[in-house]
Amino acid sequence: MRIILTERLKAHIFRSTGATLLAFFLSFPLNVQAADEPTHLPVAYLTKEREAPTALSNLDPVIHDSGIQGARLAIEDNNTTGRFTNQSFTLEEVVVPLEADVVQAFKALAAKGYRHVVARLSAADLVRIQALPEATDLLIYDISTRDDALRGQECSAQVLHLLPSRAMRADALAQYMLKKRWQNWFLVIGPGDNDRLYASALKRAAKRFGMRIGEEKTWTHTFDARRTAQSDVPVFTQGVDYDILVVADEAGLFGEYLAYRTWLPRPVAGTQGLVPTAWHRTHEQWGAVQLQNRFREQAGRWMTEEDYAAWLAVRAIGEAATRTGSVDHSRIKAYLLGDAFAVAGFKGKKLSFRSWNGQLRQPVLLAAARSLVAVAPLEGFLHPKNELDTLGYDEPETKCRLE
C-alpha cells in the first residue's frame, strides 16, 4: 500500500493532532510500504468510583469523567499516527464500584493480557496493585497521585507517574518566590493528612531554595464561609509579619477564603491563590490552545490535570510503539525509560521519565484563577543534566530503589 501526503491530508493532520505530529509525519519518506493487517496494542483504563466531595462552590461543576476523557482523546491521536505506522490502539474502560475490590479488577485485566494499565486510583489502592505478582509483567500509569513516598521509599519498577509530585509543585513555587524575593513565608496547614504531606514538601522546598518560614499555623477554625470570611481569617493572620502566605489545603476547605481577608495585604499561594499545576485552562502557549480546543469539543468542558495525565500516558505508549516499530511490552518499557524517549506535552519542553523513580519530568505551570503567571523551572535555575530535574527529588536525593 502506498501512502502519499497530499496538501489536503497535511491540513487534516494539523487540525486533528497539531503541528507536532505533522512535523513527525513529514520526517518519514513519502512512500511507505504497509502490511495488510496493522499490529494491535490494547490499553486498559482502570478507576474506582469515589464518594462525591462536598460541594464547596456552586460555581465549580462536579466532574464525573475526569481522566477518561483525556485517555479517549489520546487513543484517537495514537490511531491517527497508527494509520501511517501500521499500528492500532484500543482502550478498555473499567470502573470499579465503590464497594468492590480494585485488586480483582486489576487481576482480571492482567489475565486478559493487558500490559499497559492507566490507573486513576488512590495512593492506597495503587500500593496494593503494584505489589501484586500480576503487576510484574506490565506497566501501570499513575495519573492521579501526588505522593512523594510513591516516588521514593514505596516506589515500584512497574509504575510510571504522570502528575507532578508534591515536591515538584513546591519547588516550582519556591523558584518563583525566590525570583520575586518573597523569602519570608507564613505557612498555614489544613487538618488533613494530605495537607500535612504538602506542608512537608513546602518546608523541604523552603530549605532547598533558602526561604524562611517565619510563622507556621494549623487551621483549627470553622469551615463556615460566612464566619471564616468575616472574622476568623483577620484574627488568624494578625500579629505576623511575612512576604507571602503559603497554604496547604488540598481539600479546599478554607484556603479560598484567605485571599483579600488577611490582616496584612499579602499574596496567597499553594493549594489556593497562585497554584502549581500540571495543566490549567488558561494555558495557551506552545500550541496548547489546539489541545484545549480539541478536548473541549470532545468532552464539553475544560481539561483537568487528570485528563492531561491520562492523555500523556496514552500518548507516551503510542510514541514508544511508533518509535520502536513494535507493540512488544519489553521493548516499549525499555524505550520509555531510556534516554531516547521524549513526548511532546505542549509545555515548551520535551517530557521524559526519570529512570530512577518513574516520574515524568515536566514543567509545572503556576496559575491564578484566570491567568497563567509563570512556568517552572524558571530561567536561571540550572542543572548539570536536565533543568526539569530542578523540580522534585533529583537522582542523588531519591530513596527509590528499583529492582
Image: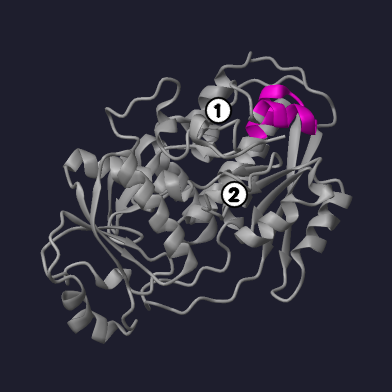
Which residue is located at x 66 percent, y 23 percent? 323
Q: Is residue 6 visible?
A: no
Q: Which image quadrant is residue 268 in?
A: bottom left
Residue in the image at 64% along x and 44% along y: 155
**Which residue is tagged 1?**
342
Percent x, y of residue 25: 58, 23
Image vertical order of residue 203 relative to residue 12, above or below: below
| N-terminal label among 2 and 1 | 2
Q: Magenta span has 95?
A: no
Location of residue 206 with respect to 227 vertically, above or below = above
At label 1, counting other C-alpha atoms closer than 10 Å, the crowd grade (few under 14, some 14-19, many 20 or more) is some
Viewer-side residue, 305 vs 140: 140
- Residue 245, horizontal then vertical, whole percent: 23, 60
The residue lying at 78 percent from left, 30 percent from top is 330
Mark whose residue sits in front, 2 or 1: 2
258 above or below 158? Answer: below
Residue that label 2 marks: 150
